[in-house]
Amino acid sequence: MLTLGEKVRKIRSKNAGPFWVTIDIFCGNKKIYKEVCNKLTNSAIVNLLMISEQQLKRFEIDDLNVIKFSFPRKIIQGDIFDRDMHGAQLAVLLSEMKF
Amino acid sequence: MIPIKVLVPSGVLGLGFDLEALNNGVKNNPHIISIDGGSTDSGPYSLGSGTSKYSRAAIKAEWKSLMIARKKANVPLVIGSCGTCGTNGMVDWMENITIELAEELNQNIKIAKLYCQQEKNFIKKNFQLRKIFPLNPAPMLNDQLIEEMTNIVALAGAEQIQECINTGAEIILAGRTTDTAIISALPLMKGANPGSSWHGAKVVECGALCSTNPTSGVVMVEFDKTGFTVEPMSKNAFCTSETVAAHMLYENADPYILHEPGGYMDVTYSNYYNIDKKKVRVEGAKWHSSTQYSVKLEGAKIAGYQSSLLVLLRDKKYVENVKKWTDKLSKFLKKEINERMDIDTSEYTLEFRHIGLNSTLGELEKNLRSPVEVGVLCLITSKNQISTEIAKLINPFLLHFPLSSNEELPTFAFPFSPVHSDRGCVYEFALNHILELDNPMDAFQIEILEV
């Protein structure tokens, strides 16, 4: 079984201001984009990141073949318990997810 | 209107740019040179302490190139968010660098300084008047929290930058400003399409990140009545409709909407197409003015004083049982700290992170294999500077703490002497709010000087 990272062109994550994180999945082409849109559920993302479904925003950007998720950080950027100031390593969790 | 060309040398002063590309930009006759000087991107320390993230020498070297370019182009040069955080002190810091360079370069310049820092009493008054509103999510605001903040800034928008441009200043040193406003201000003034002025500004606010060659830095964006055209200035960089469109996603929670002082832009119906190999044309963004003008606030407060220790475990038994080891050690240390120093656990936090195991993702980590070695990072944060003394108490136990009582005393690897590092004062963000203003200049001041 492929991982999501092996399936798509690129996955990146980044802080969007100190209070939010955003994840962009660049699918690479329309076929994979459609497949990921259909199979990748919000609940899978919510379980993976341990966040609540109400806080998750999902965008499907047809023109770019991109699926984007945004959600408020559980730990505000730079808090003493923050482990990853820019949230850029979160993308690895999605990359390594079985798809 | 004549099209307005804005030259953006890079995403932020201090990151570097291609000098040849900058010269190409100057030759293309820009109407203004705009560069960002900061952001909250690196965390709360810069704002909390009111200091620059980048070294003064790096800032001065790059600012020198830009002052030379400005003179050649004979147009205004504007920097937003001086010294990373954009406090008044950092505007003055930038002024100091500018005056030094003006002397070195033998330039006579009119400078406008835009101050964006907010007095605590002004914020308290507006909070009581219900002119401050939380964004989602936001810390719960009250007078005590306002009092605890070390620095509060409001983010200037296009209106305040336009006030500065109208003074006729050749160099504008702005405190905290939205990344986009330093770019959109002039085209908006000259009658360019409002939605496209903000959209184009957003596309180039990180310099050449909207191109195929992000590190080349320099881009030119040209605004007119119906849209904007973006072109990288390095001969090795190209903009494609995809690299340009994709930039709206970057660091943005919402890929279509961007809030700015005075309204928001919506790029849902934008069209992107390549004019040639390098240039991309974009039209279709809409600007929606709000009835009430507001600006965003940023603030930071002291979170505590922090000390850290690092110990390396290579012994297989300890690597395999590292979590159990630190749990046991943590319990033991809290008791020792209480008994020997008379400090209750409510006065400090003690945290262990396992480097090599899950120190990046913490409880989210799925891939928990036993590594060859583990670095145990011990973090102590206290309300006052006692964290150093706590670290010193921890030191011998971190070196020798055994898993069981009936074994020879182990000794782990300390990579440093002294083992502990004082991280000093650490800060946290304390505001994610907006402030309503009757007049855009109500929370901002401009000072003019000639050197």
Image (cartoon, rainbow, N blue to C red):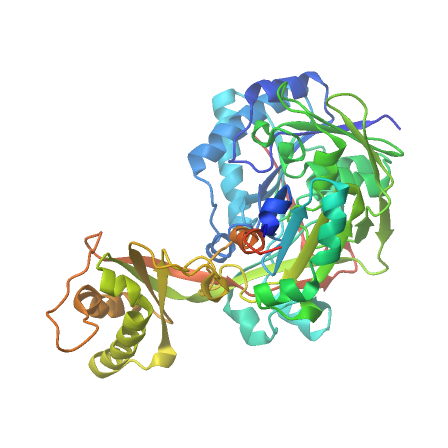
Above or below: residue B46 compared with residue B129 = above
Horizontal and vertical percent position of residue B287: 85, 48
Q: Name the side, left or right, on which B69 lies relative to B181.
A: left
The answer to whether one can see residue B174 in this image is yes
Residue B406 lies in quadrant: bottom left
Q: How many marks?
A: 0
Nearest the eye: B80 or B325? B325
Nearest the eye: B149 or B229? B229
Horizontal and vertical percent position of residue B77: 64, 31
**Residue drawn at (59%, 50%) of the image:** A2
**Residue drawn at (72%, 23%) of the image:** B278
Above or below: residue B344 compared with residue B70 = below
**Residue drawn at (29%, 68%) of the image:** B321
On-image quarter of the N terminus of chain B? top right
Residue at the limit of the structure toward the front, as seen here: A1
Residue B111 lies in quadrant: top right
Residue B68 lies in quadrant: top right
Above or below: residue B145 compared with residue A69 = below
Q: Name the side, left or right, on which B231 lies relative to B66.
A: right
On-image quarter of the C terminus of chain B? top right
Horizontal and vertical percent position of residue A67: 71, 51
The answer to whether one can see residue B178 in this image is no
Horizontal and vertical percent position of residue B229: 79, 29
